[in-house]
Structure formats: structure tokens, C-alpha cells
Amino acid sequence: MYLVTGGAGFIGSHVARALAGRGERVAICDWLGMAEKWRNLAKHEIEDFISPDALMRWLGEHAGRLGGIVHMGAISATTETDGDRILEHNFRLSAALWAWCAEQRCPLIYASSAATYGDGSAGFDDRLDRAGLGRLRPLNLYGWSKHVFDRRALRAAAEGAPSPPKWAGLKFFNVYGPNEYHKGAMQSVIAQHYPKLVAGEPLRLFRSENPDYADGGQLRDFVYVEDCVHVILWMLDHEFAPGLYNVGTGRARSWLDLGRAIFRAAGLPERIEFIDMPEALAGRYQYVTEARMEKLRAAGCGVNFRSLEDGVAAYIGGYLSQSDRWM
């Protein structure tokens, strides 16, 4: 059996679907809340559901029975300001799972984030050693919470401290795709704006406050969620050097590129306007993200990441434009 934390969430629900789809027994640890998050799992066979506050007890009852843990559970809002809450969910739970997996000799794949790279001035290279990792400066609390656990994991590995027999921290870049609808303001621009565009509104993008980037010229490595899942399944099935790995396409694209892809996939005339960046993002905005993918390729992972245009077309054509948007 596999455990997927955050398994009713965005990436986690896709991992659960993929594992169940190939005949694996899957246990889900997550909160569902009162909205429609449950729909992310409605089509798939699930072995068990665990409340996060009962997780460690459940693990104690299932020692020796897990083939691996995929830890996607976290507070992922880049605007979260409660440091204690962030540390409890994003650091301490990860540390507890690390210790359990080390003791039980259970593989652990956990979600890190490209937010750990900060403004990108130190690059986006996942081959950094401990000293190089220490030079990164995340721009927000969420990114820091992921970064501090990454540093802890690398230190444990370097010092020979107890570690899972196989582990990876995946630095996800700008992931988009079906089942993100519960994320509110943290949904992708595609999910947030598609209904508005169909209703006749323009696409509104942030103006640039950096002279090196034109309005709409800010760059992101947009990666389709299904491609991320293929990486996770590959890691569960293969041996590789433990460590941190980028998960992106390796090619940065502009917000204008994204906007044009949305209009094209929706069959709508292009209408794009620019608005001022919110004060909350001032000094915390990444103007470029672009994954270095050599490390994952060298490990033997041959996932073929789809282009921005192909991913947006698949998302809009197969999900957002349909009455049933869930995968």
C-alpha cells in the first residue's frame, strides 16, 4: 500500500489516481473541508482515509505495510503569514515522516518547491551542495519552510544520519492542470481566468516593476500536472541517487505566451490588459523561474514534458470547457 499525504489536493490527487489506476492500494491523508475538494478523488478507488492529526498513530499501526510515502501535504499559499502554522505543517510533519521512513526503511518522495530559489539570482540548479543550498534566499514564508527542510534532508544525508532508503525532494515549478479548483487564489491563471474570458472579460496580467522585463514578459517554467506525476511514478519504480530534483520543463515562457495559449485553446479573440502588482507581492515576486533538468535526466528519468501550448490545450479542451472538470 502507498500513502499519499495531501492526497485530496492538487498534485496529490493525481498521484493517488495514477497509483490506484495501476492496481495499487492507496491510503489518503488530508482534510476535505466543506467545499468540493472531495471531487478530486471521486472517480478513484481508495483504500483508506486518514485525518492529518491521526497520521502518526495510523503509521504506527501500519509499520512494514507501506511500499512508499508520497508526501504532498503542505500549506502551499505563498501569501500565508502565520509562521507557526507553516512550520507545523510544512516542516515538523515532514521531519516526522522522514524519521518514520528511516526507521521503517520506507521510500519517501516529498514536495519541495521552486519558491526555494528566491529571485533566481543564484540560479535554478538542483545540483547544489549544502553550501550552495545555503546561499538561496526564498522570498516568502512558504518558500522558506520548504527550503529549511531541504537543508535538513541534505545535512542528514551528508552526515550519515538515519534517512529513508530512497528519498527525493521535488522542487516543483509552476504546476497547472485539473483538480486545482479548491486552491482559490492559488489556482493557476488558466483556471482562475478561463471562465472570465468565456464571459467576455479580458485577461489581466501584472505590470512589470523590473526594467529588465516588459509588462507580461515575466517568465515562468509552466509544467502540466500529469508530467509531474510521471516523474513521481518513475521515482517510485526506479533506483536513483537520493537528493533534491527539479520538476519543470526546463524552458521558461512569458505570461504573454501563457495568455495567448489560453485564448487560442479557448477559440477566443485575444484581449490582454495590465494591472498594478498588489502591494503584498512587492519585493516578493519572482520575475523568472526556469528549471535546470540535467540532474533528473542523468538519473535516467525520460519523462517527455509537454509544451505550454499542448498542456494548456489539454487542460482547457479536456477539463475546463467540460461540465465535469475533474480527472
Image (cartoon, rainbow, N blue to C red):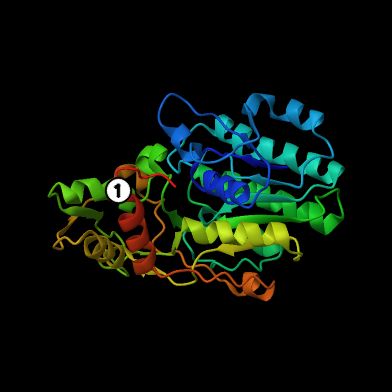
Q: Is residue 267 above or below residue 140?
A: below
**Label 1's element?**
loop
Where residue 103 appears, as percent x and y from the top left, is 86, 42
In the rendered structure, the answer to whether residue 281 lies left or right of residue 266 reads: right
Q: Nearer the viewer, residue 244 or 105?
A: 105
Q: Nearer the viewer, residue 202 or 318?
A: 318
The quarter of the displayed image where residue 62 is located: top right
Which residue corresponds to the image point at 56% horizontal and 30% vertical from the top-left?
85
In the rendered structure, the answer to whether residue 159 lies left or right of residue 231 reads: right
Which residue corresponds to the image point at 34% horizontal and 68% vertical from the top-left?
309
Q: Is the N terminus in the top left, top right, bottom left or bottom right quadrant?
A: top right
Which residue corresponds to the image point at 54% horizontal and 41% vertical from the top-left?
44
The quarter of the displayed image where residue 318 is located: bottom left
Where residue 22 appears, as percent x and y from the top left, is 63, 52
Name the residue tied to disc 1. Answer: 322
Which residue corresponds to the image point at 39% horizontal and 51% vertical from the top-left?
283
Other residues around mark 1 within 10 Å, as few (<14) / some (14–19) / many (≥20): few
Q: Is residue 278 above or below residue 59?
A: below
Identified by mark 1, the residue type is: Gln
Where residue 56 appears, as percent x and y from the top left, is 74, 29
